[in-house]
Image (tube, rainbow, N blue to C red):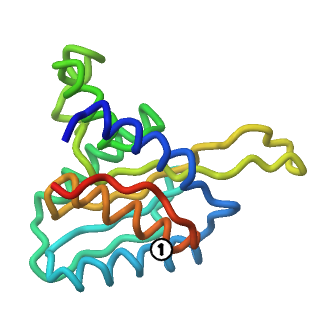
Amino acid sequence: MNPTDDLAILAQQENLLRFPAFDAETAWQLGSLLHAALLGLNAGGTVEIERDGQLLFACTTPGAKPTQADWIRRKRSTVQRFHRSSYAIGRELARDSATLESAHGLSENDYAAHGGGFPLWLQPNPAAGAMAPTCVGSIIVSGLPQRDDHNLVVNAIALYLQIAIPQLSPA
């Protein structure tokens, strides 16, 4: 799993996985897909979806651990800071043999460059004056190995949007 190869796929995923609109109903539907996926894997996990700082969806599945709440918080901070997936930030750091602290001066107490956090992007809407995509929130999963957390999120978004996306090779 070469970080450079992964980063090319991650960039494509981030460019493709953009919503025409996103509200509480969208969060419920997407969160329900993620919840069902975790149950299907018999995985104890936690899901949180927020938009503009408002929590729209949160759940855990049987076997979830209390420490996942801290992972969620730290992954969310990373997504909010960089408007990128937390896994992409981790792969960039791996490629550069760096850490959040050495590259960005960020404490791992507050940020996590591990898979499972994904930015909630809205497509440009010229009619509403938005000429560029807008990052308005985050979709976070914790509970699986980080590459699997990432894949769970992007596959659920792709399913919801009914689009095909390039896939990372399995771990």
Q: Is residue 88 left or right of residue 132?
A: left
Q: Secondary structure at mark 1?
A: helix
- Quadrant occupied by the N terminus: top left
Q: Is residue 41 left or right of residue 63?
A: right
| Residue for point 29% across, 28% down | 92
- Quadrant occupied by the C terminus: bottom left
Q: Position of residue 8 (x, y in %)?
A: 41, 37
Q: Is residue 28 left or right of residue 161?
A: left
| Residue for point 65% across, 52% down | 122
Residue identifier under label 1: 30
**90 is higher (above) or lower (below) than 153:** above
Q: The residue under label 1 is which amino acid type? A: Leu
| Residue for point 68% across, 63% down | 21
Residue 57, picture quadrant: bottom left
Q: Which residue is the extreme one toward the right?
A: 127
| Residue for point 85% across, 42% down | 129
Q: Nearer the viewer, residue 47 or 151?
A: 151
Residue 34, picture quadrant: bottom left
Residue 139, picture quadrant: bottom left
The number of numbered badges drawn on the structure is: 1
Q: Position of residue 95 (x, y in %)?
A: 23, 24
Q: Position of residue 93 (x, y in %)?
A: 24, 26
**63 is higher (above) or lower (below) than 98:** below
**55 is higher (above) or lower (below) than 97:** below
Q: Position of residue 86 (x, y in %)?
A: 32, 42
Q: Residues within 10 Å of mark 1 (few under 14, many from 20)?
A: many
Q: Is residue 53 left or right of residue 58?
A: right
